[in-house]
Structures are given as structure tokens and as C-alpha cells.
Image (cartoon, rainbow, N blue to C red):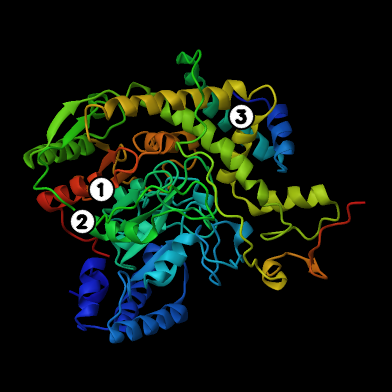
Amino acid sequence: MTLHELTIEQAARGLRKKEFSAKELTQAVLDRIDAVDARVQAYLTVDREGAMAQAEAADQRLEKGNAMPLTGIPMGIKDLICTKGLRTTCASKTLENFVPPYDATVIRRLKDAGAVIVGKHNMDEFAMGATTEHSAFKITRNPWNLDRIPGGSSGGSAAAVAADMCLGALGSDTGGSIRQPASHCGVVGVKPTYGRVSRFGAAAFASSLDQIGPLGKTVMDCAILLNAISGPDPKDSTASPSPVPDFTQITGEGLSGITIGVDRAFMTAGGLDPQVRTAISNAIGTIESLGARCVDISLPHTQYAVAAYCVIASSEASSNLARYDGVRYGFRDKEQTDLLEMYTQSRSKGLGPEVRRRIILGTYALSAGYYDAYYGKASQVRTLIQNDFEKAFEVCDAIVSPVAPTPAYPIGDTIENPLSMYLLDLFTLSANLSGIPGISVPCGFSDDHMPVGLQIMCRHFDESTLFRIARQFEQQAGITGKPAI
Amino acid sequence: MKTSKEIVLKVARLARLDMDEADVDLFSSQLGTILDYVDTLNQVDTTGLVATSHATTTTNAFREDEEIPSLNLDIALANAPEKDDGAFLVPKVI
């Protein structure tokens, strides 16, 4: 096995045993990027010098025998998370030249744990999209089939992990943006509980929904990464003071004592691809074979989740993105001599069509005379969606479902019809609306060999159960194989 | 139903976005499709329900009110499109 193919768990062991150095590992990842990223287009920025310097420091630590959990592990970061001194664009023209003066809390924590940051991943502009086609700079391709989308918005991160261009990544998930690309690219992706991870230094899209989380090659790698980034933060008042357990401590024999809830209406949903349905049904069978009990549950208001999400996410986005006015940072149309015209032209020229569409929708939903009918109504429906989950979790420990209704589809398929793209988030975005954690773990392939992911969701702050079920499933199911890129 | 062009233009003005004729056409049609779909929310009886504005039960996150160093002026201004004399420069307002 070549170094770039290692998991974080394997690499950390190899580094400690001095089988290879952090510099050799980082160089292998950089070489891999040189070899395949011209085709995949996952990276917006590769920091070769910075990465090698961090690897050098990691080797010194390893030499002294005081390595930390991520010492020498090459990581990639979604380009909406601020990295001090390293360009952070949100895949938007408006931030094309933005160099953050500080690290996001999650980046500081990764660096404190010894990680090597090799570069920044492409995404849908400001995380608005499900395909990574809505980047101002380039379209990322699915390593399993270069004509297909990698999913999104953390599509660059999922593609980079799948193609071994980093050992793990951090993405963000507002409506499925970690889990859905993880599913499409055959990697593991976790949306932690709302409040588990600080968002300080991550560009805000929809503040009541956004959550940062890990993407990795295995469930254990994601647990290692979530250990490193979780916990309260004086700089983010939404980061919860809840105690953070060691997520890598996966206890219990098999899955005995665990009850899994399945909403059969999800499995018969009209848009669900039969191949995805088969893969999910088989996965449920595997989970039962591990000793879990399966019960029927009902989440009747999920059918309204996309509509509620459209309103809530767009409303919050229209407010959050008001800051891109060309005054303190970002693109400015310097031709303008009038202040209002300078704001207007800077925003119109700096922000892409999908971002402008959502700002318009959100501004409309919040404007005088429409607020109650749209934002008010959607927020009430959100209460019903949360109540559904609370009721379901009275009878089960975890809910399993598809991640996405179809395997990754051809690039360009939804570009003309934004609503068709929004509808594909049906299974993922109710976890954001209710704040619960969710994971996507590979569970099979379509006939044309595109990966399919299984979603598991648990109660607030119960990522430990999430990791336990996902880990046991991963080992039992034995889904293997890498894209032939 | 297509959203009227007047509404799209009014909302664009509120959001400080400029639109050409083609944008207005496209957005009014796409926005109409999305809003028709959003109207399915009206099938749900929400009488008397409390609205949820966030997904956490955390309230009042307090911390010590301590003085900590902030970014120095040069670093804070490093990304400014235009600056002068330690300040962000904008077109003349008055």
C-alpha cells in the first residue's frame, strides 16, 4: 500500500513506529495531488511549502516521542473555513483574494493536535448547492466517474478523500453538505450535533443550521477528527458546554441492545432510486444481523422539510451575506463613486447566480408583509419536524435512511432547475432543522459502480451511538474498493 | 406561478443587487417555481405552535468579561479593498 492510501489510524501508527516520516507522508499526498487533481479538480489552493514546514515540525515532535493524535496527518479543508495566512475563498469571486488574519477555532484545534494542512477544497459558492458545480472557479468531478457530480457542497473535500489527496477533511453541513457528497464519493461524513463544534472562523451560510464536521476514509478516522475539533469555545456562544466523550472508544458487543427506527415511507418515496432502495434494505438487514432490533417509526412532517428549509436557509443567508459589501474585505467595484452603487455593483459582480438567487428568495421571505407567511410558517413547521424526531427517539436509539435518493448523477443535470437540486436534500436536511447528528457510511454500489451511502441519525449529543452503529456496520458490511483514478 | 418582475426588482433593491433584464426574467420564473413549492407549507395546520428559530436548548452563554488583545490595525486592514490612514476608505457619503 502506498502512503497516500493510508487511513489516519494507520498513518498515526506508522509514524509512531517510524515506518515513514511525516515529510514522506506529506510528500506522498502532494505527489498524489499532482498526479490526479488535474482530473478531479478538488483543490482550490495547495500549500506545498506550508505543508512541508508543518510536516518537518511534526517529525521533530515524533522524534521527541511526544506526538499528538493528529501529528503529521495531512488534511484538506473546505474553503469556507478560515486558515491564517492561507487564502480562503468560499469558492466565490468576492473572496478570490481573501487571506484570513486568523485561524478558525477548528483549524487551531487541528493544528494543536498536530495536523498538517495541505490545502483548501472546492465547494459550491458559500456552500449553496449540492453538486460543487456552483463554484466560481471550477467544477469538481466524482473520482468514481469523472462525468458525474461529487455531490456538494463539500464536494471538493469528499472527492479529495475518495481519491487519496488527503487523509481526512473538514467540511460543513447546512442541509446535507457533508453527508451527501460523502455518500456520492464512497467516504464517511459526519454532521455533528448542532453546538458540538465551534463555527468561529467559518463563513456563515444559515446560522441556525450550519455545522462543521469531518470527512474520512473510515468511521474511526471521523471519530478521531471529531475528538480533535469538538467542545465549547468562548468565541462561539452556540458551541455547547456539553461534555465531549472520547468518540474513538466504541463499546458494546455487536449491536445488541440497540433499537433502530425505520420510516417505511422513506423507503417507498417516489424519487428513491430502486438501486439505492436495495442497498439501504440490505444495510438494514446487516444491522439487524449484528443484533439490533428494528422498529417502524413515522416522521410525517419530513415531506415539508425541503420547503421549510428553502425559506429558513435562504432567509438566514440573505442576512449573513449582507456583509459582502466591498467595504472591509472582498471584491469592490472601484469604478463606483456613489456608496450605494458601490455596494450594489460589488455584490452583483462578486456573488454568483445561485447565491444571488438565495439572497433574493430570503430577502423576499423576510420582507414586510411576507414574514409571517414564509419565515414564521416555516419556523412553526420546523417545530413539528423536531417533535417528530423527539417522538421517534422515545422508541429507538437511531434512525436509518438513505442519504441521497439517487447515486451521483451526470454533471449539468440540475443546473437549469434549482428546485430539482433542492429536492435531493430531502433525507438529510431534517437533521439540520432539528439539530441532531447524522453520518453517511458507504453501504454499497449502483449497477454502474457508483457509491451509495447509508444515513444514521441519533439523539442530540449522542454521536457515540452514531459511531458505534456505523463502525459495526462498516466492519460487517465490508464495503471495499477505491475509484480507479 | 411566475413572481412579478416588479417584486423581483423591489427585492433586489432591498438586497443591494443589480439585475439586468435577462436576470429578472430568469429569477422571476425560478423564484415562482420555488415559491409554489414552498406554498405546500400551507397544507400544515400550525395554529398555536411555537416557532423554532434554532436547534439548541442552550440559552445565555456567559463568559468572563476579560480584556484580550485584538488584531492590530495593519492586519485588520490587510484585506481592505481601499484604505487610508488606518481606516477603511469608501466613496464620499456627504
Quadrant location of residue A28?
Answer: bottom left
Query: Count of labels shown?
Result: 3
Residue at position x 49%, y 37% in the image:
A418
Q: Secondary structure at mark 2?
A: loop
Q: Are marks 2 and 1 on the same chain?
A: yes
Q: Which residue is mark 1?
A: A464
Q: Secondary structure at mark 3?
A: helix
Tell me how far mark 3 sits from mark 2, CA to CA: 45 Å
Q: Earlier in the sequence, mark 2 or mark 1?
A: 2
- Is residue A323 shown left or right of residue A471? right
Q: Residue A468 versus residue A425: which sits nearer the camera?
A: A468
For residue A168, the mark is none
Residue at position x 6%, y 40% in the image:
A289
Q: Earlier in the sequence, mark 1 or mark 3?
A: 3
**Crowding at mark 2 (Cα within 10 Å: few <14, some 14-19, many 20+):** few
Taking the image as drawn, is residue A160 in sight?
no
**Which amino acid is tagged 3?**
Ala
* Disc 2: host chain: A
Tell me how far mark 2 sits from mark 1, CA to CA: 8 Å
For residue A365, the mark is 3
* Disc 1: host chain: A
Quadrant location of residue A424?
Answer: top left
Q: Which residue is mark 2?
A: A249
Residue A321 versus residue A82 in the image, above or below: above
Dot in front, 1 or 3: 1
